[in-house]
Amino acid sequence: MTCEDARRLLDAHVDRELDVATDRELTRHLSECERCAREVESIRALKKALSEGARVRAPQALRRRIVDALGSSPVVDRARAARAVRWLPRSSAIAIPAAIAALLAFLLIPRMFRIDQGDFLVREVVAAHVRSTQVDHLTDVASSDRHTVKPWFEGKIDFTPPVTDFQARTFKLVGGRVDYLDDRPVAALVYQHGPHLINVFVWPSDGSERGPTRLTRNGYNLEHFSHAGMNYWIVSDMGVDEMEKLAALLRS
Ligand SMILES: [Zn+2]
């Protein structure tokens, strides 16, 4: 028996699931091979640790709290979090410490990283909006004519943003400018709705359809979605209902 053969059988050997002949052959290999023998000891130790901890299961309340904590972030897929947490009590061999360690390794750490990234982008979007309304740099091209605004972007950024005026629907195109978000130049389309100024930041997405995700930050409402190959971030101090109307127009 080779080490490779042996490795495949070690788990079953520890669980006493091998037939007598195979087990005898494996035992002979283990008596001659220190590496495989050590591997068996590791498997035994791991199984023992897990079964001792298995007396403490994840209570329903804990699961709910984990899912809620994950779900309260706009960039965490709540359904995915629920799926990941559901297996905590289902697996009889896995204790809370092991389950939480696994959860941290497979779910929380990459997710936390993404939450940080998402939060950073949200701050950038709000800051860009505030900057544009405060330092008199709302537009580089001031026009309600999309046939003026759209070509203006040519040569300034490496994509063509969709530009539409929704004046008939009370969202008047005011103009556009190039801004810088998410480590890249983006198109900022500026709309006016009553007294409210709106920045719509647009740049190419990875092609997947996402969102809409809505959130409020520093008194501003934000809505984010990816549609038809573009990422959209809408930011304004107008109400959520108005925000959704504009988002629907941009998606249509
Ligand atoms: Zn071996």
Image (cartoon, rainbow, N blue to C red):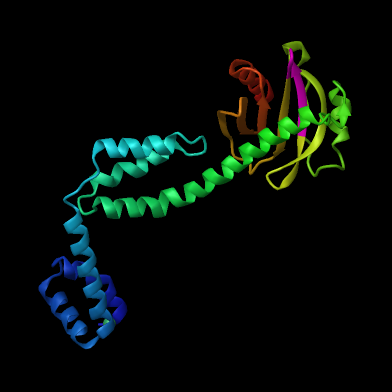
- Judged from the image, the quadrant occupied by ligand 1 is bottom left
Residue 120 seen in render: yes
191 magenta-colored: yes
Question: Which image quarter is the N terminus in?
Answer: bottom left
83, above or below 20, in the image: above
The location of residue 111, given as percent across then percent down, is: 48, 47
81, above or below 12, in the image: above
Tell whether 171 sits left or right of 6: right
The location of residue 92, given as percent across then percent down, is: 20, 50
Tell whether 76 sits left or right of 41: right
- The residue depicted at 85 percent of the width and 29 percent of the height is 149
The location of residue 235, given as percent across then percent down, is: 67, 27
Q: Residue furthest left?
A: 20
Residue 228 seen in render: no
45 magenta-colored: no
Tell me which segment is drawn in magenta: 188-196
Of residue 142 and residue 22, the one placed in the foreground of this image is: 142
Classified by dominant secondary structure, the portion drawn in magenta counts as strand
Q: Quadrant of residue 31?
A: bottom left
- The residue depicted at 22 percent of the width and 74 percent of the height is 40
Question: Which image quarter is the C terminus in?
Answer: top right
Tell whether 113 sits left or right of 177: left
Of residue 211 and residue 228, the one placed in the foreground of this image is: 211
Q: Quadrant of residue 206?
A: top right
Tell whether 67 sits left or right of 187: left
The location of residue 100, given as percent across then percent down, is: 32, 50
- The residue depicted at 62 percent of the width and 37 percent of the height is 122
